[in-house]
């Protein structure tokens, strides 16, 4: 047996197990050893049903039966209930306002429950317990999963992620066999000893044993810390190395006179914030170097990132390619057609007084400004003609969706690539844009998504970070309220006052249509179609209500948004399709139904739709959840001063593994745990930089080079 031995050649596997291991991306012994437990569960924590005490929180395993839904006689509240039985006794479990749970399981399923033991009418029951299906009956001191527990002295047992065909039990016994073979003794540690000693981290062979078979509670934690550091360290090495490689390319020198840029900015009806001014200065400093800029502009919703982008794009329109009359070009890629169209229209306003040509390319068609017929407006144009002008350098600024990176799009002198909400694009998509020219373009990424600083340092390690941490003057803080069913009528009364004053309203729903009536869980989420009908019939009869969602065609979405902007629609019922970029200054109220179903970052983005003017803005978060964790998260949205603070609160309140986008960012659950630790991230970043500074080719570290060669889809510029 070697680290590269195949699992199917080492263990006797059933066809189902082979499929399951492939699904978990486990093929070799070393991959199995790096398949870490998600948690550790103490054998002593598991209770027999006969031992349960009223008021305590307990974990039990058992067989489920007597599943049914019912409705309270007085309260009319629907609930699910079931009986749980182990070898020592039975207990009832009740899930209030969660009738769908009765349909998630079948009679005879083995389940694990975690909840508080409550007393009612002289009997015990579990109140709203967490429940999950298991493969078999309980693991307890009398029926241990680990027959050699006493021998190895483990105080807790590891729990591994499972899939159909492979259980946590199977994974443990397979790893146990590998470790007992002595294989780990011969695996060479890729992390240099001096780094391990500096941060008091265990060697690889020790960490592998401790992470799977901890003899002390601290062993598992120390081992996980070591592997978390290792993952962040390798990500940083990849990012920093890719940055150095990209910076070897020659880029365009942009040295527009400051007074010219100041004159352009002075035409705006507002003064830039200090944060915007500082961001523009930092970007111009990069552009004055022939080394390509790699910068992330992170700003809260409404902080003015588009203004900064416009000022930089203007500077390029004043420059010409060396030895040519052709102006330098800007490409601006947005994640949705709605946002791309709005950016195109905004840029027309910014540049209408200048001899600047602006193009728009989306899946729905192309546009060009100015029009030969009407120099003050735009015209529809064929894609073939627009691409011909882009390739010839006659289009100065091209705005578009992912259509901008198609092979048919080529530039004469692409000097600046801007990507808005770049986490919505894959690495390969970003690479296609920044590699559309030689010299390579300067790169500016922008995001309004709140990202914890540690996460930004990790996933955007190859980008210099600039923060827009101030809002334009005159903006009033948004009033955010958490609304429960009992307060809905008061909310509607407050909203009516704003509508009477001429303001407009967004109503955000988690679903587009009502689902199959048999799926009770789905029915708990309001739908755009039904909610718009209900509001028109029962609440806001005198107002114009329309809908917007992702299944509509781009032209339908565009027409609806145009009507909303023209105030022909008072209330827009929509899905989270309005999350990014939609800009209607007169819409100052947003109602988010089922707020607990959205992440905090997404809620913050949605709320940002109504802080586009100096009118007082309101955000109502509607929830029926009684879960304390949910209440804490929504309260964080209410109290956080800005998106940056909110991102840190979200990271602290939620399990790191719950943060969306792990796959997009190329970070595992274990790596996400590390991101809660700023010191660890900074240490890994510093060590990676120092190693590349002393040994840019990494020839001194062949194991590290080999490991990096096996990683992919990590860097933005590889």
Image: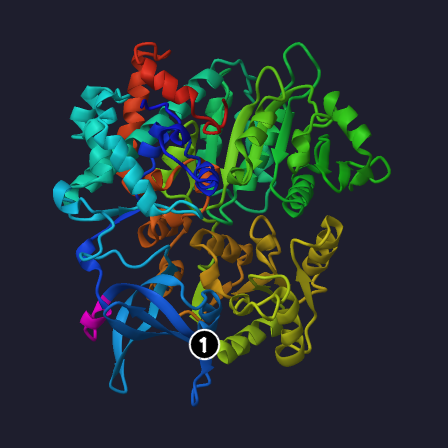
- What residue is rendered at 45% in x and 66% in y? 106
Which image quarter is the N terminus in? top left
Magenta residues span 49-57
**In this figure, which residue is indicated by the disc labeled 1?**
68
Residue 452 horizontal/vertical position (percent): 37, 43
Q: Is residue 635 visible to us here?
A: no
Q: Quadrant of residue 223?
A: top left
Q: Residue at the location (55% across, 16% down)?
A: 251
Total label count?
A: 1
Specify whether residue 51 is painted magenta. yes
Q: Is residue 650 visible?
A: yes
Residue located at (82% from left, 34% from top):
382
Q: Is residue 637 left or right of residue 442?
A: left
Reply yes or no: does residue 706 show up in magenta: no
Q: Quadrant of residue 68?
A: bottom left
Q: Relative to residue 607, is residue 196 depicted above or below?
A: above
* Nearest to the observer: residue 521 or residue 491: 521
Which image quarter: residue 171? top left
| Residue 565 percent location from the top left of the image | 68, 57
Give the percent coordinates (x, y) of residue 624.
45, 71
Residue at the right extreme of this rendering: 373
Nearer to us in this view, 467 or 238: 238
Q: Under tag 1, what secondary structure?
A: strand
């Amino acid at each position: 047996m070697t680290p590269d031995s195949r699992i199917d050649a080492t263990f006797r596997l059933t066809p189902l197990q082979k499929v399951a291991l492939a699904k978990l991306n486990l093929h070799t012994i070393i991959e199995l050893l790096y398949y870490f437990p998600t948690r550790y569960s103490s054998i002593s924590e598991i209770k027999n049903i006969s031992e349960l005490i009223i008021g305590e929180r307990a974990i039990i395993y058992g067989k489920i039966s007597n599943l049914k839904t019912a409705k309270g006689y007085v309260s009319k509240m629907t609930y699910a209930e079931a009986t749980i039985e182990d070898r020592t006794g039975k207990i009832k479990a009740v899930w209030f306002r969660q009738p769908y749970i009765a349909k998630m399981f079948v009679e005879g399923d083995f389940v694990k429950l975690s909840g508080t033991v409550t007393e009612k009418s002289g009997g015990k029951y579990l109140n709203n317990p967490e429940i999950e299906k298991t493969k078999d009956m309980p693991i307890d001191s009398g029926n241990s999963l680990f027959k050699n527990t006493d021998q190895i002295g483990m105080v807790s047992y590891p729990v591994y992620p499972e899939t159909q065909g492979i259980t946590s039990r199977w994974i443990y016994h397979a790893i146990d066999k590998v470790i007992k073979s002595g294989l780990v003794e011969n695996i060479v540690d890729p992390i240099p000893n001096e780094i391990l000693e500096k941060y008091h981290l265990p060697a690889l062979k020790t960490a592998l044993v401790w992470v799977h078979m901890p003899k002390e509670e601290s062993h598992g934690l120390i081992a996980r810390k070591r592997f978390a550091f290792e993952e962040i360290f390798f990500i940083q090495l990849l990012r920093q190395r890719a940055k150095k490689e990209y910076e070897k390319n020659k880029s365009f020198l942009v040295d527009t006179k400051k007074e010219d840029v100041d004159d352009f900015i002075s035409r705006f009806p507002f003064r830039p914030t200090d944060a915007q001014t500082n961001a523009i200065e930092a970007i111009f400093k990069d552009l004055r170097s022939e080394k390509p800029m790699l910068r992330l502009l992170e700003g809260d919703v409404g902080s003015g990132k588009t203004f900064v982008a416009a000022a930089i794009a203007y500077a390029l329109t004043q420059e010409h390619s060396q030895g040519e009359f052709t102006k330098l070009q800007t490409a601006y890629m947005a994640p949705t057609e709605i946002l791309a169209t709005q950016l195109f229209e905004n840029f027309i306003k910014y540049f209408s007084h200048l001899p600047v040509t602006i193009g728009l390319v989306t899946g729905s068609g192309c546009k060009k400004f100015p029009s030969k017929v009407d120099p003050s407006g735009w015209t529809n144009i064929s894609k073939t003609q627009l691409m011909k002008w882009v390739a010839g350098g006659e289009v100065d600024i091209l705005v578009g969706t992912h259509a901008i990176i198609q092979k048919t799009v080529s530039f004469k002198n692409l000097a600046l690539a801007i990507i808005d909400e770049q986490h919505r694009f894959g690495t390969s998509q970003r690479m296609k844009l920044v590699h559309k020219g030689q010299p390579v373009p300067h790169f500016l990424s922008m995001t309004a998504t709140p990202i914890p600083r540690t996460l930004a340092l990790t996933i955007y390690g190859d980008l210099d970070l600039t923060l827009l941490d101030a809002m334009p003057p005159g903006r009033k803080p948004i009033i955010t309220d958490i609304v429960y069913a009992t307060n809905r009528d008061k909310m509607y009364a407050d909203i009516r006052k704003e509508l009477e004053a001429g303001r407009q309203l967004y109503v955000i729903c988690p679903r587009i249509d009502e689902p199959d009536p048999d799926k009770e869980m789905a029915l708990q989420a309001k739908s755009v179609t039904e909610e718009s009908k209900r509001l028109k019939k029962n609440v806001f009869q005198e107002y114009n209500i329309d809908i917007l969602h992702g299944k509509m065609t781009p032209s339908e979405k565009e027409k609806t948004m145009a009507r909303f902007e023209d105030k022909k629609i008072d209330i827009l019922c929509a899905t989270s399709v309005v999350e990014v970029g939609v800009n209607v200054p007169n819409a100052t109220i947003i109602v988010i139904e089922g707020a607990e179903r959205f992440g905090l970052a997404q809620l913050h983005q949605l709320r940002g739709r109504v802080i586009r003017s100096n009118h007082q803005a309101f955000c109502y978060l509607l929830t029926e959840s009684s879960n304390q964790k949910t209440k804490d998260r929504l309260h964080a949205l209410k109290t956080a001063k800005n998106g940056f603070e909110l991102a840190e609160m979200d990271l602290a309140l939620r399990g790191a593994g719950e943060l969306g986008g792990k796959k997009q960012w190329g970070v595992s659950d274990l790596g996400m745990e590390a991101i809660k630790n700023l010191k660890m991230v900074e240490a890994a970043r510093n060590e990676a930089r120092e190693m590349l500074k002393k040994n840019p080719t990494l020839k001194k570290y062949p194991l590290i080079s080999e490991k990096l060669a096996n990683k992919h889809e990590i860097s933005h510029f590889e």
